[in-house]
Amino acid sequence: MRKKTFEKIAFSTIGWFIGLVWILPVMGILMTAIRPYSEVIDGWWRFDSFNPTFSNFINALTHPTASMLEGMVNSLIIAVPATILPLLLATIAGYGISRYKFPFRKSLVVAVVLTLALPQQMIAVPLFSIMSNLGLVDTYAALILVHTAWGIPWITFFMRNYFKTLPNDMEEAARIDGATDFQIFYRVVLPNAFPAIASASALQFTWVWSDFFLALILIYSPDRILATQRVPLMRGQYHVDWGLLSAASILVMIVPILIYIFLQRYYVRGMVGWSGK
Amino acid sequence: MLRRARLYHFGIFILPALTLMAIFVMYPTLRTVFLSFIGEDGSFTLSNYTEVLRSRDIFNPGGYEGEFPFGALIHNAMWIAIHLPITTFLGLFLATFLRNVKGGGIIKSIIFLGMVMPMIVGGIMIRFMFDGSVGVVNMVMGFFGMHTQTWTAYPETALFSLIFGSVWLWAGFSMILYSAGLETIPNMYYEAARIDGASRIKMFFKITIPLLKPITVVVVTMTLLWELKIFDIVYVATMGGPGGSSNVLALQMYLYGFREWNAEKAAVVAVLITLFTLVAAIPLIRSAGDEAE
């Protein structure tokens, strides 16, 4: 019995030590962001003097050339429609694939998995040409369309897997009562699909918010660029201003982290379900 | 009748999603393949491929007098060789170990933070960890009296800094998947083994690992895809530098396509990355195909 308790304490100590090591870089960014640079120049872990300040955050938010406030508003303008649109289209498609028989249904599923493997670099150059032909380069419409198209395959796959686990009985009953396909979809299927929709929304929103590459090639006006694009601009010209850079990083990171904290259940389930099936 | 119903269902359920995908994903993909085979005079040619594969940016096995840079292709291969085994085993270890720790859930959330933050911030974190004056790596090394420097700023250490930093970012992925997998193993297997007098280590290798094999396939596939597509971290932490010594394929594609405006060379690099990701994804594609039957 004594051996058991000793083992438990040893395990916990090692476990918490690992957690401490893992959180050190995040702590570092946090400490550097809330303290004046003169205090952290020899290492943020020294606490000879400790004067917390918001000045780095205020400077990052109101930066003269790359204001984070503007960037975060821009990112939000992209991320909200780029989450709702693909979810709508892909939920419908995922339901269709799970319930009806089509020619090439199997190849459709395989095609969806193929697109999961596709790097964004593979579409970058032609995408830029398409958008400039449509006169959409440097507009939010371009980025929203691409994120929607890019999100559709995995959300379709994800929703299909979810719908396959839902029994068909209620839909059959509704059909016998004379409901149309769309009535069935809105009244019966959607309410039951809420957990899956929440998971997919959390992930899609996080990915769009965190995206850097697509924004980098499509948006370039200084007042239109997104939050993620502004972070690299915070690096000073001759030396790295870590206070500013840390504050900007925290501002960009806080949104996905809040989503993760509040929707943890859905988030992890989405991640596991998405890659596990 | 049946045929018309099928068409109708296809039209209302699939077509809207498929149209957008066709315009913004499938067409550009095929167009990139096409571009990669087009010469300056507009004719079909393989010269883009020979030019790119011979370029020192991509493939430079001799290095610069035997030192970095070795070319983006080799850098990606090194990334995989180091990062894949470490993150996979580390994730499995953490998932198994933290199960028996009080408050393990909180520690898992901390480790998973790296997966939640935007990769661009991940890159800043890595640059920060390895910084000469404020970095935590130097704090530890200085504590043991070792040499300190900004590790991402030197050709010999830049790529390794990024790779080990990305272990910190990515380990949470395999840990979460393995944790979910461990929950599905019925406890009675272990109880039966315990009655038979099996040791804990033996149970781990004879029960846990074999039953987690499907998860391992997913973890390895997804990790490979991530390593092949790596971009943001390198862009923000080193921009492939110094002197190309931490360059990777995805970044080189961006440099060709959007800095040099050479669409053909960029297309070749994109096709190369895609070939690798497709090979990596074969197990996933196969299982999806079987399941769709």
Image: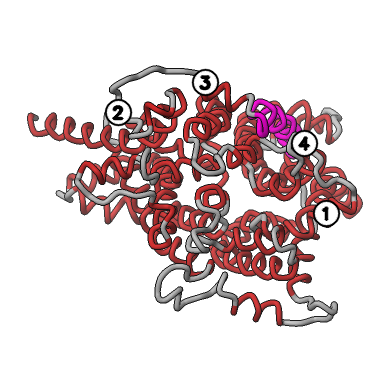
Residue beneath the point at 45% across and 61% down: B79
Spatial CA span between label 3 and label 4: 38 Å
Q: Residues within 10 Å of mark 1 (few under 14, many from 20)?
A: some
Spatial CA span between label 3 and label 2: 20 Å
Region of the chain picked out in magenta, as a range: A64-88
Spatial CA span between label 2 and label 1: 55 Å
Spatial CA span between label 1 and label 4: 16 Å
**Circle 1: element type:** helix
Mark nearest the camera among 2 and 1 is: 2
Judging depth in this view, the residue of B74 and A19 nearest the camera is B74
Judging depth in this view, the residue of A210 and B129 nearest the camera is B129
* Discs 1, 4: same chain: no
**Circle 4: element type:** helix
**Residue A118, percent across and down?**
65, 58
Residue annotated with mark 2: A46
Q: Amino acid at mark 2?
A: Arg
Residue A265 seen anywhere in this rendered image of the structure = no
Residue annotated with mark 1: B23
Indicate the chain on which mark 4 is placed.
Answer: A
* Discs 3, 4: same chain: yes
Q: Amino acid at mark 1?
A: Ile
Whether the magenta-drawn stretch holds residue A74 is answered as yes
Residue annotated with mark 3: A55
Residue beneath the point at 74% across and 62% down: B261
Does residue B55 sit above or below A219 in this rendering?
Answer: below
Whether the magenta-drawn stretch holds residue A82 is answered as yes
Lower position in the chain sequence, tag 4 or tag 2: 2
Lower position in the chain sequence, tag 3 or tag 4: 3
> In which quadrant of the rendered view does residue B272 lie?
bottom right
